[in-house]
Image (spheres, rainbow, N blue to C red):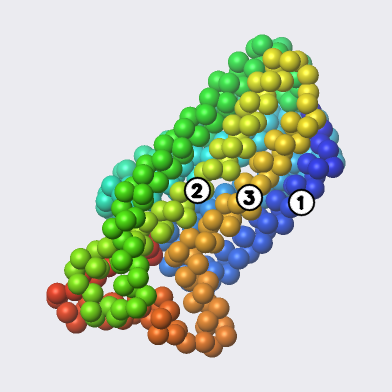
Amino acid sequence: MFDETVLDRAWYIVDIAISSFTLLLNMFVILKRRKLLRLPIFRTVTILQVLSFAKSVLQMVIGYHKIKGEANCRVVVFFGLVTSVAPLFATDFCVLYLQLILIKNIERDQHWVFVAIIVAAAVFSVVPEAMVLVVPPRLLKLQSYCEYDAIPSKELIIFKWFTTFTWIIVAGLIGIWSLTVILRHVMKTSSRVESAINCSRYSDAAHFTVDEARRLKRARINHALLHIAWVPVTPIISMWFAVTYGTIRYAKQRNYTSLDSISTTLQCLSVPFIAAIFYAYAPVRREFVSIYREYRGLPYLPGDRGSQLMSRRHSAAQSSTVLKPQTEEELV
């Protein structure tokens, strides 16, 4: 069990480096902009990076020091399953959260909705996988859970489908459904907001009509949705490929080195992909720009986002005829 190739270890090192850099960057941003902690997506992505870092470190450690003992193998298998399934449900939460807030207009003070999603994601990420802690290995035709990664028997592949594969498929379907809903919403409303985007570039907030402000608000919502909607894509592709490969191993009763390498590569690519999407997300990107300008001592230019936000807020406070459009930061 836990045999690794040079490629596997190389990808684990890359994952550790990216996760470490992302966590340090998040800590720096938190020190400068504590308000970002109010963003559930910021907290979720930070947790994802922690899980990825822990998983890669564990894989590196057990690659050099073989795990012995039934109890140790059970814990390692359990942790590996949880860190494989949890990122899928975590990315689903990010997309569902924005979908409910920005499209369905559910108020954020309706905590029970979001608590229900979090609890469901945690349950499906932990409870089925916890079966490895209680089911005797002999029922799976194994001498020990240290052989869990061997070519599966009929009993073992059924167990894997019950504890892991099924929930990976379910999480992937939820992510695809959410992505489809968001893309349909954006396509349906995009034609109505193009003029608002141009208006925001060349007009002052004080001259916005109510209709223009609403369209500008919708344009910003679509912009935020389009960035986060793609977060579940690489976890879905990588984990569905892993499920397919695991099933092929059982059907053919042999290992495929090339498919195993592809599976490892896809799973490791999820880390930089999610990090890139996260830092492109408007509220986070805007804070990075703000911190950079403060560090360099650069003021906002007249056409910058910061000056536009300040101008719109000031005009909204002065005039009762202008609708104050919400920003992504205020929305999410």
- Residue 174 horizontal side relative to residue 206, left or right: right
Label 3: state its secondary structure: helix
Q: Residues within 10 Å of mark 3 (few under 14, many from 20)?
A: many
- Residue 17 horizontal side relative to residue 175, left or right: right
For image coordinates 53% across by 71% down, the residue present is 288
- Residue 220 horizontal side relative to residue 78, left or right: left
Separation of disc 2 and disc 1 at Cα?
A: 25 Å
According to the picture, the residue beneath numbered tag 3 turns out to be: 271
Per the rendering, the mark at residue 13 is 1
Mark 2 or 1: in front is 2
Per the rendering, the mark at residue 230 is 2
Amino acid type of the residue tagged 2 in the rendering = Trp
First-in-chain label (2 vs 1): 1
Separation of disc 3 and disc 1 at Cα?
A: 12 Å
Per the rendering, the mark at residue 182 is none
Q: Where is residue 311 shown, x and y percent of the image?
A: 31, 81
